[in-house]
Amino acid sequence: MANFTVVDHPLIQHKVTIIRKEETSTKEFREITNEIGMLMAYEITRDLPLEDVVINTPLVETTQKQLAGKKLAVVPILRAGLGMVDGIVDLIPSARVGHIGMYRDHDTLQAIEYFAKFPTDIKERRVFVVDPMLATGASAIAALNQLVNKYDVDANNITFVCLVAAPEGVKALQEAHPDVDIFTAALDEGLDENGYILPGLGDAGDRIFGTK
Ligand code: URA
């Protein structure tokens, strides 16, 4: 089983409390969601491999470290995942950004991909899939199914990153994709009868884009 990590740095906890508040404005919500994304980027990249590089300082030649290994991709699940991308990419500017959108067919209840565009070499990249809310896990599982089955990405190279997770979603995602690491800023109590996370922060997409 891959790792499940709650990134509970005090700055992150403080910022998550702000975005939970119902009176937080769209502007502030958007800014802080990106800030949390940036702080989480620090943690989700902690295990990136390094290699030695010989450089010259103004004084001497010296052997130092630089990032090695796979290139990175950030893949937001549309649309709420977009809210964390800028913050993450600010910290890892060389990362490419792919997008995936899924909807649930009302009749068949199957998750259908309605949009996907990835870097052409996505298979060779370490992929961070981003969605602020891990509620039932349905959209995360559907997006990861597509990446693994249709686009041939190795699940061991995928990390799922969210802001708020429900235990139900974590369990479902771990069962469906046991090789995918999960990072969240908060682990909440559970889901209500409509599939919203409690205490949660409401509909993340609506709060990021001001559509409600
Ligand atoms: N999606 C959201 O945006 N919020 C929830 O609480 C659950 C799913």
Image (cartoon, rainbow, N blue to C red):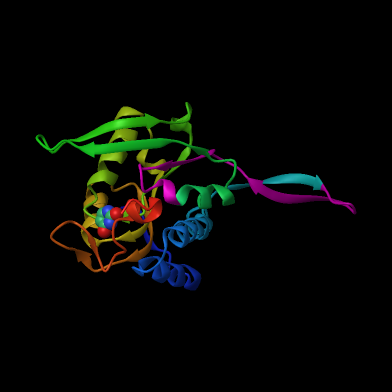
Farthest residue, direction left: 107
Quadrant of the frame with the C terminus: bottom left
Q: Position of residue 9 (x, y in %)?
A: 47, 70
Residue at the image point whose x is 33% and y is 46% from the top:
179
Residue 134 appears in view: no
Q: Position of residue 97 (x, y in %)?
A: 48, 38
**Residue 173 left/right relative to 19:** left
Viewer-side residue, 83 vs 90: 83
Placement of 48 over or under 124, stated as above or below = below
Residue 186 appears in view: yes
Counting every numbered tag in the picture gives 0
The residue stretch that appears in magenta:
56-83
Residue 13, quarter of the rendered image: bottom left
Viewer-side residue, 131 vs 68: 131
Residue at the image point whose x is 24% and y is 38% from the top:
103
Q: Position of residue 170 (x, y in %)?
A: 26, 56
In the image, is residue 91 part of the stretch drawn in magenta? no
Q: Position of residue 208 (x, y in %)?
A: 39, 53
